[in-house]
Image (tube, rainbow, N blue to C red):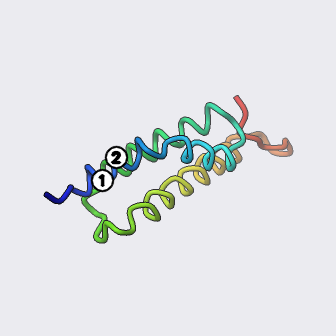
Amino acid sequence: MEQTVRQQLSDYIVAHQEEFYRLAYSYVKNRDAALDVVQESIVKALAKSDTLRRPEYLKTWFYRILVNESISLIKKYRLESPAGEDAHVES
């Protein structure tokens, strides 16, 4: 019996969550922010799992979501920081 894309994604997420955290942390340099990025990426991926046309690209597709979420968070903090201050994603 063939797994659905959503089930494949769920299995992939459970098996590789530490890798996702490490990648997000490499971008945002903050534990809590990295956890938020991973969580938001998982939510988005599960919500959009039906849009993945080629399941063999699931890993690449999810990593792209994770990287985009990391970059979005960095941009958000840069926009919110006062002008002239060094913007870091720090809590």
| Residue position marked by numbered label 2 in the rendering | 11
What's under tag 1, amino acid-wise?
Gln
Identified at 77% across, 40% down, the residue is 82
- Please report contact status of discs 1 and 2: CB closer than 8 Å, yes or no: yes
- Residue 55 vertical placement versus 86 (above, below): below
* Residue 81 percent coordinates (x, y): 74, 40
Identified at 39% across, 50% down, the residue is 12
Outermost residue, top side: 91
Where is the C terminus found, in terms of image quarters?
top right
* Residue 74 percent coordinates (x, y): 66, 48
What secondary structure is marked by label 1?
Answer: helix
- Residue 39 vertical placement versus 5 (above, below): above
What secondary structure is marked by label 2?
Answer: helix
Can you tell which mark lies on residue 43? none
What's under tag 2, amino acid-wise?
Asp
Q: Find residue 52 and report its image quarter.
A: bottom left
| Camera-nearest residue between 89 and 13 | 13
| Camera-nearest residue between 10 and 31 | 10
| Camera-nearest residue between 40 and 59 | 59
| Residue position marked by numbered label 1 in the rendering | 8
* Residue 55 percent coordinates (x, y): 31, 66
* Residue 60 percent coordinates (x, y): 47, 65
| Left-right relation of 89 to 50 | right
Identified at 43% across, 44% down, the residue is 15
Identified at 54% across, 57% down, the residue is 68
* Classed neighbour count for the residue bearing mark 2: other residues with Cα under 10 Å, few (<14), some (14–19), many (≥20): few
| Left-right relation of 62 to 32 | left
| Left-right relation of 86 to 49 | right
Outermost residue, left side: 1
Where is the N terminus found, in terms of image quarters?
bottom left
